[in-house]
């Protein structure tokens, strides 16, 4: 699990460095580890899904991003409540994806 956590954080760092392709690779690896070891109903999976969805948005892969972001937003809202900063971040990434998709059409 440490490797998934590390790859998740590195992926987030690469998004911040405006390298969503490297982020995508790391986050896709991390999500597979979380899926295999924890299942999809744990917050670790939602956390990685959120950031992988964000990387997909940055890459213009809006259809791939949307379900990840929606599920992550639901999980964060359920666990933390809608007003928590993690939940607000999830909603922000979901809106960012919607806006970017509309503007690309």
Image (cartoon, grey):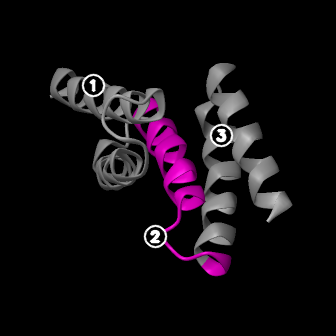
Dot 3 corresponds to which residue? 23
Segment tinted magenta in the rendering: 36-58
For image coordinates 57% across by 51% down, the residue present is 48
Is disc 3 surrounded by few (<14), some (14 to 19) or many (20+) residues within 10 Å? many
Q: Is residue 6 left or right of residue 15?
A: right
- CA separation in Å, label 3 and label 2: 23 Å
Front residue of this view, candidates 28 and 6 = 6
Labelled pair 3, 2 in contact (Cβ < 8 Å): no
Helix, strand or loop at label 1? It is helix
Q: Which residue: 40% across, 50% down?
A: 72
Mark sitting earlier along the chain (3/1): 3
Crowding around mark 2 (Cα neighbors within 10 Å: few <14, some 14 to 19, many 20+) is few
Where residue 16 appears, as percent x and y from the top left, is 65, 21
Residue 88 horizontal/vertical position (percent): 37, 28
Where is the N terminus found, in terms of image quarters?
A: bottom right
Q: In which quarter of the image is the C terminus?
A: top left
Does the stretch in magenta take in 40?
A: yes
Residue under label 1? 100
Could you tell me how far apart the alpha carbons at marks 1 and 2 are, in whole angstroms? 28 Å
The residue that disc 2 covers is: 41
Q: Which of 24 and 37 is in front in this view?
A: 37
**Horizontally, is 74 left or right of 32 in the view?**
left
> How dense is the environment of label 1, judged by Cα within 10 Å: few (below 14), some, or many (20 and up)?
some
């Amino acid at each position: 699990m440490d490797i998934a956590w590390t790859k998740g954080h590195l992926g987030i760092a690469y998004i911040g460095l405006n390298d969503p392709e490297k982020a995508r690779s790391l986050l896709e690896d991390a999500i597979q580890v979380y899926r295999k070891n924890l299942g999809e109903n744990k917050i670790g999976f939602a956390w990685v899904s959120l950031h992988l969805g964000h990387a997909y948005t940055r890459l213009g892969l809006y259809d791939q991003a949307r379900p990840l972001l929606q599920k992550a937003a639901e999980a964060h809202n359920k666990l933390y409540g809608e007003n928590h900063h993690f939940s607000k971040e999830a909603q922000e990434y979901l809106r960012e994806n919607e806006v970017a998709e509309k503007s690309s059409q």
